[in-house]
C-alpha cells in the first residue's frame, strides 16, 4: 500500500488502512518513545496515544511533510509532554513529602535497560541513558532520534522543524554535555 | 576534581549505543490500541456534563452574584417607616371602598 493509498483509506475511516498504518509504524513509534521516556509501560501508553491522535487528526494532515515525519513529530511532542508532566508530579511529590504527613518514599526509578543494546554494553548504556535524561529537551530528542532510532540529520531536521546544521549543532552539544556529565559523575 | 571514569571508559559509555537494535512494540499492540480507542469512541458526554459548560455556568452565576451584591451595596439604606395599620373597622372598610358617601337615594 503506497502512502497516498494509506492516507486515502485513513481519511475515509477504513479500518484496514489504520491497521496497516499501525503495523508500519508501531515499532518506530514505540522505539522513539522508549528512548525518550526510558520506561516500557509509559512508552506503550504514549505509542497508543500517538496512534489515537493520528486517527483523530488525519484530516488535518496537509501532506506538506512525509507521513512518517508527522508521526515522529507527534511521538516526540507527546513523549516530551509526558516527561514534563512527570517532572511536575515528581516536584509536587517532593514538596508534599516535605510538608505532608504521608512519608511515602520519593520514587526512584531503577536503571533503564534498552532491549536492543548488546549484552556486553548494557552497563555502559544504562549509565549513558541516565546522563541523557539530564540533557535539555532538544539535545535529548536529537540524540535519541540519531542514536536510538538511527535517523539521518535530514529526517531529524524535518521532525524538529529545523535545519540540518542546527541538528548537527544540537548533537555536538549533546555529546559535549554528556562527556562533561560523565566526567563529573560521583563514585 | 579527580575523574571517576577514565577517558577510555567514557568513550566506551559514549559508544555503548552503537549497533543498537530498535525495540519492537509489545505483542498484541494493535488489539490493545483498539481496546483503548473503543471506550473513547463510545463515550458521548452529555454537553451539560462537559467541564467547559460547567465552568462557564459557574462563572456566569458568580458574575451575576457579584453584580447583584454590588448593586445592593450601592443602594442607599432608607429608614423605611414601619406602618402599623390599625385593625380594620367597618368605618375604615367603608371609607376604603367609598361606601360612606351620600348616594342619590339618600
Image (cartoon, rainbow, N blue to C red):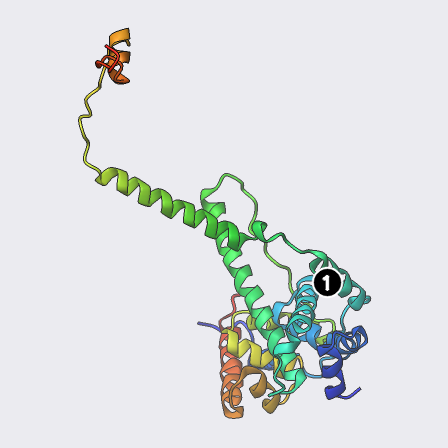
Which of A1/A95 is in front?
A1
Identify which residue, A60 or A149, lies in the foreground.
A60
| Image quarter of the C terminus of chain A | bottom right
A140 relative to B74, above or below: below
Q: In the rendered view, would you say A134 is above or below B44?
A: below
Q: Residues within 10 Å of mark 1 (few under 14, many from 20)?
A: some
Q: Residue at point 27% right, 14% down? A: B99
With A65 as the anchor, is A178 left or right in this view?
A: left
Between A43 and A122, the residue placed more toward the observer is A43
Q: Residue B14, position in %: x, y?
A: 60, 80
**Helix, strand, or loop for circle 1?**
helix
Question: Would you name the residue on which mark 1 appears?
Answer: B37
Left-right relation of B102 to A3: left
Residue A22 picture location, percent across and down:
76, 75
Residue A124 in the image: x percent, y percent?
A: 65, 73
Q: Which chain does tag 1 point to?
A: B
Residue shown at the point (76%, 73%) measured from the top left: B24
Identified at 51% across, 87% down, the residue is: A162
Amino acid at each position: 500500500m503506497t502512502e497516498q493509498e494509506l492516507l486515502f483509506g485513513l481519511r475515509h475511516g477504513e479500518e484496514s488502512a489504520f491497521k496497516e498504518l499501525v503495523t508500519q509504524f508501531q515499532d518506530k513509534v514505540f522505539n522513539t518513545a522508549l528512548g525518550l521516556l526510558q520506561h516500557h509501560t509509559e512508552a506503550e501508553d504514549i505509542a497508543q496515544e500517538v496512534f489515537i491522535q493520528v486517527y483523530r487528526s488525519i484530516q488535518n494532515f496537509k501532506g506538506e511533510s512525509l507521513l512518517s515525519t508527522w508521526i515522529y513529530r507527534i511521538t516526540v511532542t507527546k513523549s516530551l509532554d509526558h516527561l514534563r508532566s512527570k517532572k511536575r508530579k515528581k516536584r509536587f511529590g517532593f514538596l508534599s513529602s516535605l510538608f505532608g504527613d504521608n512519608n511515602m518514599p520519593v520514587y526512584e526509578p531503577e536503571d533503564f535497560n534498552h532491549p536492543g543494546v548488546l549484552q556486553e554494553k548494557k552497563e555502559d548504556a544504562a549509565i549513558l541513558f541516565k546522563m541523557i535524561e539530564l540533557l535539555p529537551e532538544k539535545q535529548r530528542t536529537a540524540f535519541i532520534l540519531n542514536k536510538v532510532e538511527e535517523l539521518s540529520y535530514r529526517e531529524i531536521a524535518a521532525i524538529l522543524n529545523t535545519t540540518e546544521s542546527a541538528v548537527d549543532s544540537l548533537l555536538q552539544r549533546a555529546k559535549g554535555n554528556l562527556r562533561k556529565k560523565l566526567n563529573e559523575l560521583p563514585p | 576534581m579527580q575523574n571517576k571514569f577514565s577517558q577510555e571508559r567514557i568513550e566506551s559509555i559514549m559508544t555503548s549505543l552503537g549497533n543498537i537494535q530498535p525495540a519492537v512494540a509489545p505483542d498484541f499492540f494493535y488489539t490493545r490500541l483498539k481496546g483503548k480507542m473503543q471506550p473513547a469512541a463510545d463515550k458521548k458526554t452529555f454537553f451539560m456534563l462537559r467541564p467547559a459548560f460547567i465552568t462557564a455556568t459557574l462563572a456566569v452565576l458568580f458574575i451575576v452574584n457579584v453584580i447583584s451584591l454590588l448593586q445592593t451595596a450601592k443602594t442607599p439604606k432608607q429608614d423605611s417607616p414601619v406602618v402599623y395599620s390599625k385593625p380594620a373597622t367597618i368605618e375604615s372598610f367603608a371609607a376604603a371602598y367609598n361606601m360612606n358617601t351620600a348616594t342619590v337615594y339618600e
